């Protein structure tokens, strides 16, 4: 069966629901973390005239109201005050913009779909916003190799839809796919639900084109799976959050769209047993696993209390969702049924349900997907995106509960177990910077001690910059700064972010 | 069925057979490409005394005979004349060695298993060889996540054997696995037979530790699938062939060992039909494909004439080998049989055989594996490792035949079609630099024009350095040089290589 409702399964849009919104007027980023403006030139009429000669008229946005959506972040948490958005239509225009800004010491905030959640894509002061939204053409698709070449501003969902006609799909899927752009995905090494199966963008981006701060175009537009010629420059731009260059074009490895999608929802006695069920899945389901998610009892209970969702299997301390995607429905069903029976026989799980029905699958995914949009019902919620080695994956939830005691309402643990990626969410009565600092200083210290990551998918951006030196050695920080100096000696690209 | 003879399937050791050997005494590298020695200090007794105080006695090799195997490359094609090999046992020793060399302007040639085929791992003049062979401990294996942490000097085959006990396997497999080291694999972004299925090392190396030219240790020892904290420094070291730092430790994502391996050997009317059969395989076999190889008639015919191999299916212009690896034998057989039938029905293939028998599979792989070791029977053979977009993949073979005319005996085309990686081999009566230049100047120019890669797996090293500017823009070359200056301002690391 060809599952036509494929796009329904957007399993992590939850992260993009603005649960952290403090008020209807976002805080100025500069005040939020008390940052000082860098020694950049202030945009003047002569600069604007230059950009007008370079670009088509509607490529510039100067109107205060129109600027709003570029100046405010996706969560409506932070705002900058850029007076100008530039939307080049060609890499040559991009090159000339950056060259001019570099020569005139004008700070630049590169922006894709502006869906980042760490403030990496919005200006802090008056940086000129350089948007990739009009670099939005699909250039070429090789149907046999599955390699898609397109411009950076292509919206992820548009690429999904484009590929659908060729029975192909993108190797990356995000909740923000309706707005986020492939260039921004690349610049942030965006993760998402398909990472377990297809790996991250360092593996899937075969080639890219980027523009350095001085306007120089770096052409790494390779469409080959194997190319070992010289230093692998493209990786400098992947995940560097627009601080080392602006990505303008990518070649990306796409994959055949699965013909069969199956789902198992399993209840286990504790996390250790759930981990054994996961390990068994790797052995028994191997090549067809496409997602391994975990949710704790606190999370599910909250959902039952506050939404119309129901459990298909009753009450258990830990739940697993295992999804398979394959090329043969009968085979996949057979594998999944046998796997479930094995887990039951070995008492790794206590109960479960296996389904290939899209409506039942949707109901199960609903439990996982609708978590964050309902958390606000429990007060103000601090949401964190961390990775941990599997042996310590769930301990941090128990530990944070003990650490916080009555300071928090609840601590919820759920996430992409398959990737070691935990979303730990902490609800409190109301927001205060005191409680935020109390949580973050302990959480990030512990995550670091456990060899985890304080940002699994979301990057450092503006909001986590202060914590980066906590988790990186002085030598690593120095090397990052050296790289920044080489790539952007005047520091015009995305200042106040990452390093 | 658990295939116990897994290690038998080393499908590309062929590349490491010394088909290009010119004589029993390898040429001095410096004379081969007429390179001038850099302004480095010559090692003196005081330097050696320093290294003796730093390292255990047997960590130094100074004896001329013992130095031989470190000074001569794997193909016995090139030699350097290093007077000293250093074999640190800890990263701290590595750090002190490099710091001393950097301060005293002593050139260094980093070396792993010395199995490179472009001269990247052997000295050109008197560089001190710093070998990772005694950094050879397995540090940790997380059986659930499949993440292995080990030192750089671990031999790939030893890691395979170690993982075998845990029903896991490395994501990389090479013909040179008995000698090559994981640190060298990382530094060269080595490819091999499993790349089609598991991707390259940028995706599979989760973390690494490396030492910069000045001795500073860069710790990126992450074991997580998702970590977006700061610039992604580890990728600077992957594939940079020891020119930007020496890798001392890695964390690598390993995969469950397949329970079922199946093979199809197919004959097609022409390359276009073979490509259609490949595309169909992607759709029908999807997640279980583990290798897609191609061989042309010239290659197979030569094998029949010069070896005891026989064709299981008779005479066809193009042959495909498709291997599957999965977790369920019955399912995999069913998929492969149906796939074969579909290809026959659509006339994408004219004949074929499908087998799960290890002995029959070995016989088929033998045809592919033993190609290079027999080519010498046709005179001197120039062997090239290129990538091309699939639409142009085979054209280059036809074109080179026309271009060379009677200058060559034969032009053979075979390779990893799944990766777009072609091994084009050209036999001539005897070696001359004239014919080499005649071939290479045209071949590399055409590969570049077709957006291919002049080095798919083997890197640039020493031998292809002259061709790098042909295939990279001035901006890219400049950026590579800037990176080199930042990472190694005195240029002590692997001089005369890559850039």
Image (tube, coloured by chain):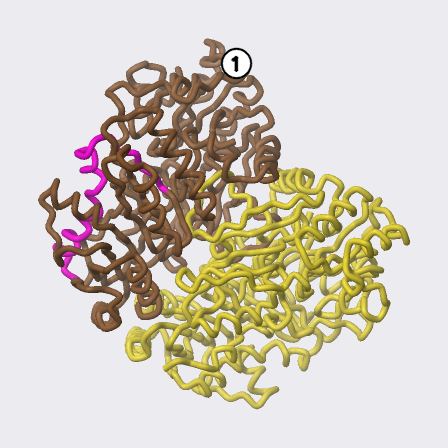
Chain colours: A brown, B yellow
* Residue B102 position within the rendered picture, expressed as x and y whole percent measured from the top left: 77, 44
Q: Residue at x 57, y 29 (%)?
A: A488
Q: Is residue B66 left or right of residue B463?
A: right
* Residue drawn at point x = 44 percent, y = 25 percent: A109
The stretch in magenta equals A356-385
Q: Residue at x 44, y 69 (%)?
A: B168
Q: Nearer the viewer, residue A186 or B229?
A: B229
Residue A318: percent from left, percent from top: 24, 55
In-front residue for pair A492/A26: A26
Is residue A253 visible to us here?
yes
Magenta-span inclusion, residue A489 = no
Helix or strand or loop: what does disc 1 sit on? Answer: loop
Viewer can see residue B401: no
Chain designation of label 1: A
Residue marked by disc 1: A41
The crowd level at tag 1 (other Cα within 10 Å; few <14, some 14-19, many 20+) is few
Q: Is residue A356 above or below residue B105?
A: below
Q: Is A374 a magenta residue?
A: yes
């Amino acid at each position: 069966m060809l599952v036509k409702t494929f796009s329904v399964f957007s399993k992590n849009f939850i992260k993009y629901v603005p649960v952290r919104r403090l008020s209807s007027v976002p805080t100025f980023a500069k005040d939020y973390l008390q940052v000082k403006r860098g020694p950049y030139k202030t945009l003047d009429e002569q600069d604007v005239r230059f950009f007008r000669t370079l670009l088509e008229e509607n490529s510039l946005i100067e109107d205060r109201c129109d600027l709003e959506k570029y100046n405010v972040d996706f969560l409506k948490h932070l705002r900058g005050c850029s007076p100008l958005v530039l939307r080049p239509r060609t890499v040559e225009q991009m090159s000339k913009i950056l060259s001019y800004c570099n020569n005139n010491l004008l700070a630049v905030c590169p922006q894709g779909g502006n869906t980042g959640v760490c403030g990496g894509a919005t200006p802090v002061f008056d940086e000129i916003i350089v948007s990739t939204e009009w670099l939005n053409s699909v250039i070429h698709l090789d149907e046999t190799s599955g390699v898609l070449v397109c411009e950076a501003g292509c919206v992820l969902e548009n690429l999904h839809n484009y590929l659908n006609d060729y029975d192909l799909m993108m190797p990356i899927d995000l909740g923000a796919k309706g707005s986020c752009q492939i260039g921004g995905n690349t610049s942030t090494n965006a993760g998402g639900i398909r990472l377990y199966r297809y790996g991250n963008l360092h593996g899937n981006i075969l080639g890219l084109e980027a523009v350095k701060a001085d306007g120089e175009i770096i052409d790494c537009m390779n469409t080959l799976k194997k190319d070992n010629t010289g230093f692998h420059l493209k990786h400098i731009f992947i995940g560097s959050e627009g601080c080392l260059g602006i990505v303008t074009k990518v070649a990306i490895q796409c994959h055949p769209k699965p013909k069969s999608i199956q789902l198992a929802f399993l209840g286990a006695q504790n996390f250790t047993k759930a981990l054994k069920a996961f390990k068994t899945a790797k052995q028994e389901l191997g090549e067809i696993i496409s997602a391994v998610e975990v949710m704790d009892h606190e999370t599910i209970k909250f959902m039952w209390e506050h939404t119309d969702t129901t459990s298909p299997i009753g009450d258990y301390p830990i739940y697993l969702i295992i999804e398979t995607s394959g090329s043969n429905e009968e085979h996949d069903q057979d594998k999944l049924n046998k796997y479930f029976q094995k887990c039951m026989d070995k008492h790794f799980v206590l109960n479960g349900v296996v389904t290939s029905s899209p409506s039942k699958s949707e109901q199960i995914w609903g439990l996982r997907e609708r978590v964050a949009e309902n958390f606000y019902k429990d007060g103000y919620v601090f949401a964190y995106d961390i990775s941990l080695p599997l042996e310590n994956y769930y301990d941090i939830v128990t530990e944070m509960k003990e650490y916080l005691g009555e300071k928090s309402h609840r601590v919820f643990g759920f996430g992409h177990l398959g990737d070691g990626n935990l979303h730990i969410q902490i609800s409190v009565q109301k927001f205060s910077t005191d409680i935020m600092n109390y949580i973050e200083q302990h959480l990030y210290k512990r995550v670091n001690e456990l060899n985890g990551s304080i940002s699994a998918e979301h990057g450092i951006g503006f909001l986590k910059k202060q914590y980066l030196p906590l988790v990186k050695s002085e030598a690593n920080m120095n090397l990052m700064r050296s790289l920044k100096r080489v790539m952007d000696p005047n520091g015009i690209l995305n200042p106040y972010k990452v390093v």
